[in-house]
Image (spheres, coloured by chain):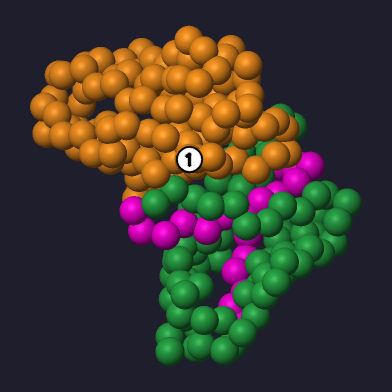
Amino acid sequence: SQKIEQNSEALNIQEGKTATLTCNYTNYSPAYLQWYRQDPGRGPVFLLLIRENEKEKRKERLKVTFDTTLKQSLFHITASQPADSATYLCALDTEGNEKLTFGTGTRLTIIP
Amino acid sequence: DAGVIQSPRHEVTEMGQEVTLRCKPISGHNSLFWYRQTMMRGLELLIYFNNNVPIDDSGMPEDRFSAKMPNASFSTLKIQPSEPRDSAVYFCASSAGYTDTQYFGPGTRLTVL
C-alpha cells in the first residue's frame, strides 16, 4: 500500500546535538517533498521544500536531503535548541499536483 | 497580511447538529485546502479548490461533509448531521499554486458530544 512513514513517533535529543528525522515513502514518485513544523495548538508551518533533482537544501541550521532511489528524505537540525522542540511533518506531492500527503510526524524534544 | 483566518477556533456541539467551519485564505492565493487532523489518522486532506473550483474531494469522508468556495476570499466546510467521530481539528490552508508553500490557519477544534 502507499504510505509515508516518519522514523519515530517521538525523538529526544540533547541540546547542542544534531537531530536527524527520517521520512520514508513507498510507491510514490514525488516531484518534491516539503517539511513542516507544528507546535501544539497551531497549524503546520512550512520550513523547506526540496525537488526531486536536488540532493540537498539548507536554511540556517536546517538541512534536508532527498534520495529518490532510497525513497527517503532526511531532515537535520544542527546545534539543536529547546526552542526547536515541536512536531515535524514531511509531505509529498503524491499525485503530481498541489495535493500533499503528510506523514504522521515526529515529536522532537530537545533536552537542555 | 493576517494569514489564513479560520472561525470559530473552538466548536462544541451535540450529535446530529449542523456544523459550519469558515476560512478566509491569504489574499492572492488561488488554491485552498481543507484538512482534518486526529491522533489516530494524522493530517488528512479532505478537499481542495483551485480558483474557487473543487478539484479533488476524494478525502471527504461521506455525504455528511460538504465544502463550498463562493468567492476567492471565503470557503466553508459543513458537516450535517455531525457525529462524535467527526471530533478533530480542522485546518484550512492556502497557497499560490503548485509546488508553492501551503500556509495553514490556526485550526478549528471541533468536539461533537
The answer to whether B11 is drawn above or below residue A48 in the figure is: above
The answer to if B56 sits in the magenta stretch is no
Dot 1: element: loop
User: Which region is colored magenta?
Assistant: A18-41
Image x and y of residue A53, in percent:
88, 51
Image x and y of residue B19, in percent:
24, 22
Is residue A72 in sight in this rendering? yes
Seen from the viewer's position, the closer of residues A83 and A74 is: A83
Residue plotted at (21% across, 34% down): B11
Left or right of A33, for residue B107: left
Seen from the viewer's position, the closer of residues B65 and B34 is: B34
The answer to if A38 sits in the magenta stretch is yes
Supply the letter of whichever chain is orange.
B
Residue plotted at (42% across, 35% down): B5
Supply the letter of whichever chain is green.
A
Image x and y of residue B8, in percent:
28, 33
The answer to whether B31 is drawn above or below residue A18 in the figure is: above
Left or right of A17, for residue B64: left
Quadrant location of the N terminus of chain A in the rendered image: top right
What residue is pinned by disc 1?
B2
Q: Write down the chain letter for disc 1.
A: B
Left or right of B63, for residue B70: right
